[in-house]
Amino acid sequence: MAGRVKTVGKRRIVLEACTEPCPIERGMRILGGKWTGSLLWHLKDGPVRFNDLARMLGGASKKMIAERLRQLEERGLITRTVVQSAPVSVEYDITEFGASALKFLDELKVWSENLPKDQLVYS
Amino acid sequence: MAGRVKTVGKRRIVLEACTEPCPIERGMRILGGKWTGSLLWHLKDGPVRFNDLARMLGGASKKMIAERLRQLEERGLITRTVVQSAPVSVEYDITEFGASALKFLDELKVWSENLPKDQLVYS
DNA sequence: AGATTAAGTTACATTATTCAACTAGTATAC
DNA sequence: GTATACTAGTTGAATAATGTAACTTAATCT
């Protein structure tokens, strides 16, 4: 496709450079972290407690889960509520803002469910 | 929401556990790496050369770009073609499979373009 | 009493990512 | 003719992110 790159003198110039992190990249920094998407996805049907999330995300360490949940909370995608049971439990719930990302996650889910078999990546 | 978590005896059981990496997570492992989405996005309108990609993704090191491109090629999302010019240049192009992810990336783009201003993350 | 639950935290090991400098051969401006 | 920018990367060392396993405190069930 023409016009996206140009040579001025001997200097090559790109016309469609990303203004620092471009939208795709900015989005990925919020949702693309390891486990982040999965966490959000598992909250889509209602609040879930910390250890239950840990069980749902077989493979993720509690450390990572705690950190990702903290980030998601900071950024307003989820809320954290302490439930006065014995022992005390903590429920995470998705916010309206968080839910606005679900459409996109669903798109991703559909895409990866149709992956060719040789694309089953474990790394 | 009821029914996703259950207590059997004193043992808590999750009914919707991810079978190892769940679809969301599998997708993210392919598209969610740092710079991966951006790279693919910048190839959507036709082939682009290595250094031009590097210019477009201000912020990413050539090392990362080279590695991400290698991964994308291995997984069949893009192709790599050496062009016999002087000096030799290399063009990257998106495959049909790669293009199948664009819908999802576009969804992400729209989402992050509508982020509240306080969500402008630089980390 | 002993095991299990809650929600994390801690220290340490392994990976990922970044940064800056470098390769080698060619073309272009001055 | 010489300096400079170009090509597509690679290299090594520094920093950041992630993983692993053990641990915490207090309460409940067997």
Image (cartoon, coloured by chain):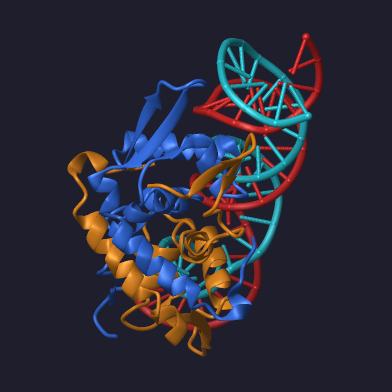
Chain colours: A orange, B blue, C cyan, D red
Task: Tell how many labels.
Answer: 0
> Is A61 or D16 nearer to us in this picture?
D16
Tell whether D27 sits left or right of B24.
Answer: right
Res B91 → quadrant = top left
Q: Where does the image place residue B112, in percent across and percent down from the top left?
A: 48, 71
> Is A103 or B92 nearer to us in this picture?
B92
Residue at x 48%, y 56% (from the top left corner): A61
Q: Where does the image place residue B82, in percent across and percent down from the top left?
A: 39, 25
**Residue A95 in sight:** no
Q: Vertical placement of A19 versus B114: above or below?
A: above
**Residue B90 in sight:** yes
Residue at x 52%, y 21% (from the top left corner): B87
Q: Vertical placement of B114 versus A4: above or below?
A: below
Residue at x 63%, y 79% (from the top left corner): B118
Which quarter of the rendering shows the C terminus of chain A? top left
Residue at x 56%, y 56% (from the top left corner): A18
Q: Where does the image place residue B83, in percent across and percent down from the top left?
A: 40, 25
Q: Where does the image place residue A20, in percent across and percent down from the top left?
A: 62, 58
Res B72 → quadrant = top left
Tell whether D23 sits left or right of B56.
Answer: right
Tell whether A76 sits left or right of A10.
Answer: left
Q: Extreme bottom residue here?
A: A84
